[in-house]
Image (spheres, grey):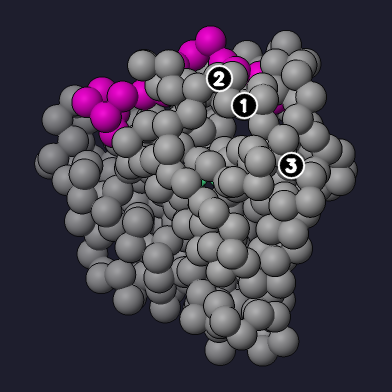
Amino acid sequence: MPITPTKKIWMDGELVDWEDANIHVLTHSLHYGWAVFEGIRAYETPNGPGVFRLTDHMKRLYRSAKIYCMEPDIPVEGSVQAVKDLIAANEIATCYIRPLVYLGYGEIGLNPLPSKVRMSIACWPWGAYLGEEAFETGVRAMVSSWRRLDNNMIPPQAKACGQYLNSSLAKVEAVKAGYDEAILLNAHGYVSDGTGENVFVVRDGVISTPPAHAGCLGGITRDSIIQVARDLDYEVRETELVRTDLYLADEAFFTGTAAEVVPVREVDDRVVGPAGPITRRLMEAFHNVVRGKDDRYKDWVELVR
Ligand code: PPE
């Protein structure tokens, strides 16, 4: 998806001009994928720009960094403030925010430990991840022939750059086969998640999603939807799902920061959509929550000013 530039990018404590936010071609992370990142969204709210669960996202970034033995120079609170400063400097409200913790230029070789840990944060306007029409029609998904990474290979609980080779292989396979998105099974054949989304199914009024140990990312949108759905008195189960649970669902949907809440129309050409009543209700609830229009969840919306 093309990037629309904004004015500034935060790099190691400084706001630099967008076009000057460059790094050397021998930057360590570029060669071995040893870096971690986040995806966060900010929305226009009645009280100005608000970042959805900003602190939770930054805590996850630092947990990812810990798994990969990287310690950013600033604490979580400093990075939270950096995001707010960046959004204010860019005079933008609705945007996608991409923090990155990576290893800089200076050392090369498979031992990442001697390299300098660096951090950047960019933000830019990013529209509907799976296309605007996907919210109405739903997406066509296929079960990938690629398996999700295992906890003892490259841990799926971190959001590490190199790990996304796995997601991208599945995405390429799906796109080349004419589908919109892929769903990955883990090594044991249980459903994990999409290439950049968690997956939910609804059957007989009960909402189910795979547990973290199935190899899915502990999605913040996933967590938000579980809470919102329970508050609406739906039963939500975190339970192992097999491929046919996808085929036999009354409704299915993806959740993610970039994707938001998107209905699934088909899985491997078996029809499960467009959006059923429970999916629609959750999409609408989520739409209001992230825009600060539901007071019950106002703590999730971290205002820029
Ligand atoms: N699973 C995967 C594999 C994943 O990458 C994401 C986020 C999720 C689930 C949902 O997590 P959360 O955003 O906390 O609800 N994917 C990010 C990157 C997408 C990209 O194309 O880049 C995102 O949504 O920002």
Residue 293 in percent (x, y) is at: 70, 80
Residue 14: quarter of image: bottom left
Upstream in sequence: badge 3 or badge 2: 2
Residue 243, numbered circle: 2
Circle 2 packing at 10 Å, graded few (<14), some (14-19), many (20+), is some
Labels 2 and 1 touching (C-beta < 8 A): yes
Q: Which residue is mark 3?
A: 263
Whole-angstrom CA distance, mark 1 to mark 3, is 13 Å
Residue 273 in percent (x, y) is at: 80, 34
138 relative to 48 in the view: left or right? right
Which kind of residue does numbered mark 3 sit on? Answer: Pro
Figure quadrant of the N terminus: top right
Secondary structure of residue under mark 1: helix
Task: Please name which of the two marks, 1 or 3, marks the residue nearer to the observer.
Answer: 1
Q: Does residue 148 belong to the magenta stretch?
A: yes
Which kind of residue does numbered mark 2 sit on? Answer: Arg
Whole-angstrom CA distance, mark 3 to mark 2, is 17 Å
Whole-angstrom CA distance, mark 2 to mark 1, is 5 Å
Magenta-highlighted residues: 140-155
Please tell me which residue is depicted at 43% across the width and 16% down the height of the picture.
189
Is residue 86 visible in the rendered image? The answer is: no
**Is 62 placed above or below 88 here?**
above
Q: Compare residues 231 and 45 and report the one nearer the observer.
A: 231
Please tell me which residue is depicted at 30% across the width and 48% down the height of the picture.
64
Which kind of residue does numbered mark 1 sit on? Answer: Leu
